[in-house]
């Protein structure tokens, strides 16, 4: 499901006060990190992820991999922080 600009605008507003739930470091996308992302998306739908220790292009690739793997949508990425959304199946 592609997000419309109106939906992204609303989600950015909701996500403004959120703190990053998951932080990626030099270890990258380990099994533990992937599991934590999955659990967080099931519980929250909207979450921030901090992608540290990577250059801009590598951060983009990591965020894209996360969104593809979890069928999530990138709402916004600023610096090391990505805001992603996955609609709860209910």
Image (cartoon, rainbow, N blue to C red):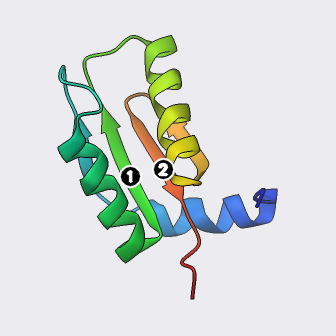
Q: Pointer 2: what residue?
A: 83
Q: Pointer 1: what residue?
A: 48
Residue 14: percent from left, percent from top: 50, 69
Task: Indicate left or right for 35 with 3 as reference.
Answer: left
Task: Indicate left or right for 33 with 14 as reference.
Answer: left
Instruction: Mark 1 or mark 2: name the one nearer the start of the chain.
Output: 1
Residue, far front? 31
Where is 38 relative to 65, above or below? below
Residue 30: percent from left, percent from top: 23, 34
Q: Which mark is residue 26?
A: none
Residue 15: percent from left, percent from top: 46, 62
The answer to which of 29 and 22 lies nearer the viewer is: 29
Looking at the rendered image, the quarter that the N terminus falls into is: bottom right
Circles 1 and 2: CB distance less than 8 Å? yes
Q: Quadrant of residue 67?
A: top right
Task: Indicate left or right for 76 with 66 as reference.
Answer: right
Image point 35% across, 45% down: which residue?
Answer: 49
């Amino acid at each position: 499901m592609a997000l419309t600009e109106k939906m992204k605008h609303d989600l950015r507003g909701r996500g403004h006060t959120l703190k990053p739930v998951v932080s990626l470091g030099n270890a990258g996308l380990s099994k533990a990190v992937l599991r934590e992302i999955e659990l967080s998306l099931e519980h929250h739908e909207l979450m921030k992820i901090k992608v540290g220790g990577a250059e801009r292009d590598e951060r983009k690739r990591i965020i894209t991999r996360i969104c593809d793997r979890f069928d999530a949508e990138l709402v916004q990425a600023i610096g090391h922080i990505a805001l992603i959304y996955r609609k709860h199946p209910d």
